[in-house]
Image (cartoon, grey):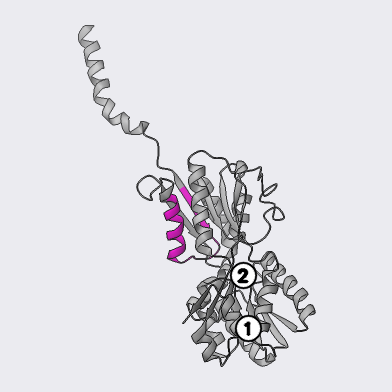
Amino acid sequence: MKRRTLITLFAGAAAWPLAAPAQQPAMPVIGYMSAGSPPGHLMTALRQSLAEAGYVEARNVAIESRLAEGQYDRLPTMAAELVRRQVAVIVASPTPAALAAKAATTTIPIVFAVTDDPVKLGLVDSLARPGGNATGINFYIAELGLSSKRLGLLRELVPGATRIAALVNPKNAANAEAVTRDVAAAASVIGVRIDVVHASDSREIEAAFATLVRNRADALLVGTDPFFYSRRLQLATLAARHAIPTVYTVREYPEVGGLMSYGTSLSDVYRQLGVYAGRILKGAKPADLPVVQSTRFELVINLPTARALGLDMPPTLLSRADEVIE
């Protein structure tokens, strides 16, 4: 009996080193899903803020990405994949991705970045007390009349403009409707005609510019959309080729040759996404984290593009710019 007992004890002891790793907590996984395909500097901003919270990718946290690249019909499948993966938190940007994530789970925490009112979208109960499994950042691209402010910038730069086009993506219905409504209201005040043109793929962008030329549009406003963001070089190139003064939503457009932009900083948005994801990994509940609202907006002007278009940049506009690209 004693010999049999000793054998059992030794067998159990031999198994201890094998069993020990199973007791270690698994590395948490952040599921990141985007309606577009964000450039590296935005993901760098997210990773930096995660690192400041103590989470370094591949060391003590993993990030699993799902990118729709403008194909919004893929988002529900991507969200379902992350739910099945049982990720610790879903980071979703912008609005179409956030809505897909919210529809896929009521239990996994969600940190979103959206361009419309998250209460109206049904993502949270209120900005101060979200109340469910989601919270995040509202970066006000389609809110607060920013489209009308961009229209005013175009009119200031091209005072003789009487016909201005607005480019929207019909597949991103919420933003398209917000931009169209905002611009139409502003146009009636300042006395310009608005032509709304649609595009949801690269060929339709080409066709939209052909329409602008045919209709002799004096200027163009590009609405918020992750697909447009991913095609910002194509948009800036076509605007330059057809000599159409164009205003965009964020600085990454003038950085690749677009004329000017007015909006919030996407790098700031992604840093905040990382901050909230880090807090949730440490145990905070989305219901207790108020939705952050962007309050800082920046005007960026590309001066060489203005010169190439034959535009005299008003000193008053230059003096208000947060950055002038020389």
Q: In the image shown, does 66 or 61 lie closer to the viewer?
A: 61
Residue under label 1:
208
Where residue 226 sits: x, y (%)?
A: 56, 67
Vertical comparison of 102 with 4: above or below = below
Residue 215 in which image quadrant: bottom right
| Residue 129, above or below 166 | above
Residue at 66% across, 51% down: 123
Binning the other alpha carbons within 10 Å of mark 2 as few (below 14), some (14 to 19) or many (20 upward) gives: many
In front: mark 2 or mark 1?
Answer: 2
Instruction: Kindly identify the amino acid type of the residue bearing the numbered disc 2.
Output: Thr
Mark 1: give few (<14), some (14-19) or many (20+) Cα within 10 Å: some
Which of these two is toward me, 15 or 115? 115
Between 171 and 222, the one nearer to me in the picture: 222
Q: Is residue 240 magenta?
A: no
- Residue 72 lies left or right of residue 179; in this view the side is left
Residue at the (59%, 41%) spot, across then down: 107
Residue 217 x/y as whole percent: 67, 88
Q: Which mark is residue 82?
A: none
Q: Position of residue 232 (x, y in %)?
A: 52, 76
Mark nearer the N terminus (2 vs 1): 1
Q: Is residue 40 magenta?
A: yes
Residue 171 is left or right of residue 269, and the answer is right
Decide which of 322, 307 is in the foreground and name it.
322
Task: Write down the residue under mark 2.
Answer: 224
Query: Of all residues shown, which one is farthest toward the top?
Result: 1
Looking at the rendered structure, the secondary structure element under dot 1 is helix
Check contact, mark 2 vs mark 1: CB within 8 A.
no
Q: Which residues are magenta?
A: 30-50
Q: Quadrant of residue 14?
A: top left
Residue 87 showing in the rendered view? no
Which amino acid, by three-letter code, is at mark 1?
Ala
